[in-house]
Amino acid sequence: MAHREGESEPRVYGYIRTGSAALTHIICAVFTVTIAVLSRPGSSLFSWHPFFMTLAFSFFMTEAILLFSPHGSPIKRFPHKTKGRVHWVLQCLCVSCALLGVAAISYNKHLNGKPHFTSWHGLLGLLTVCVVALQSLAAVPLIYHSLAKGWSLAKLKRYHAASGLVTYLLGSASLLLGLSSAWFTASVREYAWYLSALCPALPALIIMNQVTSAYMAKRRLQS
């Protein structure tokens, strides 16, 4: 009886993680579409900023990390090497969208004679874009290991996962601060704002659990 309970416990956790991963896919897609509807990309120069930044950090970056989820990856049966390359492509799309988002808001402020990067949202957003660009460049040796002489692949993966998690949390924090902007608070009602705030927060917790659980499992196997 005790043996069955021990076997059923991981299965329950597996169901929870599968449900959490599926929920994350849904939340990120719905949140991105919602911001697109509210901002109406193309209606103004500013409209491209929330659209591109949400597409970058809520959709592309989240999906890039979920590729490695054993419970929620859409290409779970593909080899790890393939996942790594698709991950890098999604991260490049994330960086491209983030740079376009920064360019849109910077040029919009320039045209309106407003100062740049004066709010916590602006400063953290700029920092996040710089960090995610460096993170993507630093991932090149994971694809072409010959470029990283003297570094083991396992160590590179650990550093990349840790720095990637920090980058993702920075992106989530930037989105949360963006929801406190005058534009967004004027676009939604109070209850909708709280629901919107959950969209970056919940995936951040699920992604953090995914990354930390993966490396804790590896340590248990090695010990």
Image: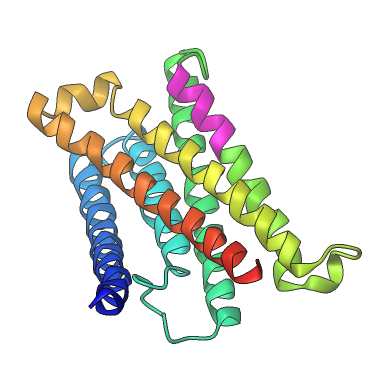
Residue 28: x and y in percent read: 29, 53
Vertical position of residue 67 compared to residue 34: above or below: below
Which quadrant of the figure contains the C terminus? bottom right
Is residue 130 found inside the magenta-colored segment of the image?
no
Q: Quadrant of residue 139?
A: bottom right
Q: Number of callouts in the render?
A: 0
Residue furthest to the front: 1
Residue 56: x and y in percent read: 43, 50
Q: Residue at x 51, y 27 (%)?
A: 124
In the picture, measured across the screen, residue 190 lies left or right of residue 112, that is left
Vertical position of residue 188 compared to residue 149: above or below: above
Q: Residue at x 36, y 45 (%)?
A: 205
Which quadrant of the figure contains the N terminus? bottom left
Residue furthest to the right: 150
Q: Nearer the viewer, residue 135 or 48?
A: 135
Q: Nearer the viewer, residue 212 or 72?
A: 212
Q: Which residues are magenta?
A: 120-128
- Dominant SS type (magenta): helix
| Residue 208 is at least partly visible in this image | yes
In the picture, measured across the screen, residue 64 lies left or right of residue 41, that is right
In the picture, measured across the screen, residue 132 lies left or right of residue 153, that is left
Q: Residue at x 34, y 38 (%)?
A: 50
User: What colouring style does the render use?
Assistant: rainbow
Q: Residue at x 23, y 27 (%)?
A: 184
Vertical position of residue 191 compared to residue 85: above or below: above
Residue 162: x and y in percent read: 61, 49
Q: Nearer the viewer, residue 55 or 207?
A: 207
| Residue 189 is at least partly visible in this image | no
Residue 221: x and y in percent read: 59, 71
Q: Nearer the viewer, residue 86 or 11?
A: 11
